[in-house]
Image (cartoon, rainbow, N blue to C red):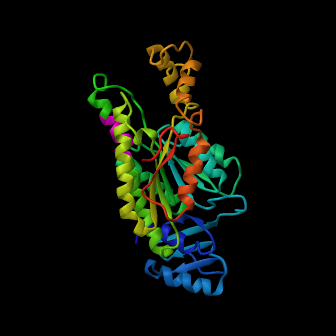
Amino acid sequence: MNILEILPAVRMLASKKGLVTCSLTDEKGEGSADEKTLVIESPDELRTAFKSWYESNDSAPESVVVSGVCTIAVDSAGDTGRQRIPGRIVIVTGGAQGFGAGIAEELFEEGANIVVADLNEEVGSEMAARLNAKNYSNKSFFVKTDVSDPDSVENLIKETTLRFGGLDVMISNAGILRAGGLDEMDPKTFDIMTKVNYTGYFYCAKYSSKVMKIQSQYSEGSHFMDIIQINSKSGLKGSNRNFAYAGGKFGGIGLTQSFALELMPHQIKVNSICPGNFFDGPLWSNPENGLFVQYLKAGKVPGAKTIEDVKQYYENQVPARRGCRVIDVVRAILYAIEQEYETGQAIPVTGGQEMLK
């Protein structure tokens, strides 16, 4: 076993009384046993060593020394009375702004340790610092990540494992949208969108599931984990002059169903969340180039004279008479995490605009 395999194994074995995080403190594995330290002579002895520890201790050790290999610090989840997912380790790709930032903030409030993964290093670092400034027992950190690059995603999982000891929830949220019909869409733009929106989800599932499988092995099937794709209502119904985005999202649901069949034996659930239009976000509401402005200038909404006219037109298409909000998506995410009997689903969060058939 290497360090990236030992850490999630130790984390699960140390989580008998509640989820913990683990972090590498050194790569030498020097130390002696005491009332708070468990010393293991070989990685092969992890199970038996922890079994012996719990025969005389009610709580997990505060540190674990694997002789000649590494020393690992163990941190408990802290006060969890008000929280729904305390101690869970959650990655949010595209987590620096928009839907991703909102998801990260809400799940942090629910006790999760958050890894903000984004291309925007400045905004992503600020996001993690803002979460840590709350001084909760759970923590956050930023990893610069390009989901279209497999090496970048693999590094994200490595850094998460070294910092927190494993991974419980991968939220594949990062995506891009470039609308256009067949005449306007150039092959390069189509390829970029597909690589981020479709292939990027594959990379996230591939590398996160490796760590999750180790955790499943050492939790002996008692711990469920999640891969959650933030999809779209455009993954449920075709989108006129927006085929590159819709096609990637349709494909994403195919990946979700297929991953779910493969990974459920490892206690890994895989689901897609399909939000409706996020009218309050920058994609729609940016005063310079948001979709409301673009549609007004293009005359896409007959009779519309102002941005508010355009917004009202699209809100009227939703039975709930409003756009999707971050909290709507977070509630669907929490449902997916908390239940243990549903996988391979595309969960609509559209205010009734799109319904399952």
Give the percent coordinates (x, y) of residue 35. Answer: 67, 80
Could you say which quadrant of the image residue 110 lies in? bottom right
Which of 37/246 is in front? 246
Q: Residue at x 66, y 77 (%)?
A: 59
Question: In this view of the protein, can residue 148 be seen by the observer?
Answer: no
Does residue 199 belong to the magenta stretch?
yes
Give the percent coordinates (x, y) of residue 68. Answer: 47, 75
| Quadrant of the image containing the N terminus | bottom left
Which of 47/315 is in front? 315
Which of 305/179 is in front? 305
Give the percent coordinates (x, y) of residue 133. Answer: 69, 46
Does residue 123 belong to the magenta stretch?
no
Mark count: 0
Q: Residue at x 59, y 44 (%)?
A: 328
Question: In this view of the protein, can residue 344 be seen by the observer?
Answer: yes
In the depicted structure, whether residue 10 falls above or below residue 33? above
Extent of the magenta region? 191-200
Q: Residue at x 35, y 25 (%)?
A: 180
Q: Residue at x 37, y 36 (%)?
A: 238
Give the percent coordinates (x, y) of residue 73. Answer: 59, 67
Q: Main secondary structure of the magenta part?
A: helix
Which of 312/41 is in front? 312
In the depicted structure, whether residue 131 falls above or below residue 36? above
